[in-house]
Image (cartoon, rainbow, N blue to C red):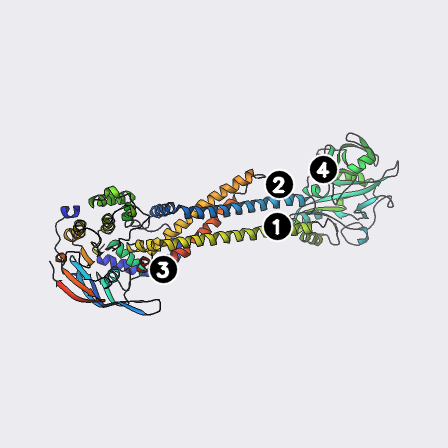
Amino acid sequence: MSVAELSLMIRCRRVKRRSALFLFFLHIPVSKEMIMQDLLQCAWRELDRRRGRTLANVLGYTLAVALMVILVSLLIFSRDAAGQVLSSTGTHFMAFNPLQSCGRKTGHCFENTKTPKTEGFIAAGAKTKLMNRAFMADIRKLPAVKDASAFLLFRFQDPLDGHLFTVGGYEPQSSAVRTTCCAASDIIEGRFLTAQDTGSVVLEQAYAITYKIHAGNTITIANKPFQVVGVVNPGVRPAKADVYMHFNEAERLISTRTIVPLNNEMNILLVEVKSSKLQKEAIAQVRTVIPDLVVSSYACWKPAAMVMGMTESSVWVLTGLLCLFTIVLALRSQWASLIERRHDIGILKAIGWTNRVIVRQMLTESLLQALIGGVLGCLLAWVILLLAPIRLLIGIETPFRGSMSPFVPLIGLALALAGGIIAGIFPALSAARQTPAAALRQL
Amino acid sequence: MSETAMQPDVPATREPLLTCSQVAKEYVGRQKQVVPILRDINLTIYAGEIAIITGRSGAGKSTLLNLLCGLDRPTAGAIHFNDQPLHTLDNETLATLRRTYIGIIFQNFNLLSSWTAFENVEAALLHTGMSATDRRQAVRTLLEELGIGAQMDNLPAEMSMGQQQRVAIARTLINQPTLILADEPTGDVDPETAAQIIDYLTAPVKSRGATLVITTHGHFPLATADQLLTLNNGEITRSLPDSPR
């Protein structure tokens, strides 16, 4: 290099220096003089030479990342499991218009039954009026609503012995039915109704026991015979009936007992909400479509949702504290390493290593430790999640899948690398600030 | 060395390579007291010459060398290397200058204690863009020329003082610097080793016209000097001879 070239280089360097810190992070592919291979080789050599410190740092990152991945995986699993439990109690409701609120355009204003004293449309023990099924399309589009279904619940009186029983007509394809009314998983005898079934019903367990009816028997409702294909025990559900059948069959059957035949109408609306936390919003949104609705649900979604939120928040806070703790430890270790190596850094500067090289060198060492620790942490977490009795630890009956979302280890790795940068950059910049002569004077 | 054998002697020229004008250096002590180390240093070192700076311990020889290679900055005055003002250049440029043009051999060698002899020498070539193969070949060749090929995988602590000195020399010469600064290079070695070291250091001057600045308190043969400077209490009190060889 000639003197003229050197002068040019010096002038260029002065201009570049102003944006050096900014370029430092964006300019990793480096110029010709900065060979990544050299950086990695030196970093690896240095880490190898200081095995004790390196192992301590890597172990710190490993444990922190493993703990974080495990915590977040358990949080996700716990949330899913709790969501499954809450889905049977906290994410659904049924809505109806009581007969007393007549006068609106949403339904008939008369009882519409031939024998109103004993028979009629009921919900939650109250007589209801009918609503147009056309509203269903609008309700299904509501942002907080996952699915909605029309439901008919009619109380019959048996002409032979005069006992009262209810018939529920549901839409078999709707998922809202499964969480509010009955589902195939509730079957305790026989089988559940399929979409192709005609002239078939399933009975509620208590009704079947009371009247000694079993799967395979035939019952008569409104002079029409129905084959009992199964018995269900839906447990706690808002919309329960003694006899369940398909909506269309219920519609035809009930029409034989009404003054005016049903015309695409329902008396109950079954709604499944997207999340238990959105239950309140969903009810409000449904009421914008059909005003004056009375909602019947179970209030357990409120505390359940709150508990879920608390658990989630506490895990994230714990994860944040864990990351902070790891970074502080790594920073302390890197700083101690810098103090040990100040003299060495002075020597390297004296033989021509630039500050940028020194900073990158120290940052590479820190990042290598973080990367190795991060990868090992993910592997450790995976093994623990696979082998440990997670169900017993967190007390959830749902079987743990033993796998984790691919995003969780990626986030763990990213956090480890971020920790590596933070832990490495401050000691590195401190090393760069010192003049070579000052560094050489330190032993 | 092979440089001597392969290349003809380059005659020294009278172009100034390194100049100091009214250079002063002070340190601030722990109790904020100012400690003057160097005062009003004026000197000119010409390209291709050997300059010897003598002086008693504590006279400021090492401090002066640190200033001449840009490891430290003067409190006052100006230092120019090849017309470049070392006293105003930023640290990055100074480091690049040292890597490319200036080599320094420290009194206590300043080898990296956890790096082998080979790695210590290779360190001067890292991040220069040279391929790993070429770099390793160059280091191996030079260490063998200096007679420490067999010790290249030893740590400094596993080597004698003379061997450590040769590693330090190899680290300096590997980049073929224009200016070589050596701080008491023969201070701690036996006369035979000292003679070898003098040969190693003067060979680049003879072969390719490098400039050599040496500080000593008397063990270096002063007759080899083109310029002899004496530092006394931070000031240059004598400057003989001041003529090319």
Of circles 4 and 1, which is in front? 1
Q: Quadrant of the N terminus of chain A?
A: bottom left
Q: Which residue bears the numbered disc 3?
A: A433
Q: Compare marks 2 and 1 and give the one earlier in the sequence.
A: 1
Q: Earlier in the sequence, mark 4 or mark 1?
A: 4
Query: On the rendered image, what quadrant is the C terminus of chain A found in?
Result: bottom left
Is label 4 in contact with label 1 (beta carbons under 8 Å)? no
Residue A392: image tag: 2
Residue B188 visible somewhere in the drawing: yes
Q: Left of A152 or right of it: where is B47?
A: left
Closest to the observer: A417 or B144? Answer: B144
Label 3 secondary element: helix
Sequence-first tag of 3 and 1: 1
Residue A177 in percent (x, y) is at 71, 42
Chain assignment, label 2: A
Same-chain check, marks 4 and 1? yes
Q: Residues within 10 Å of mark 1 (few under 14, many from 20)?
A: some
Q: Return the residue at label 4.
A: A186
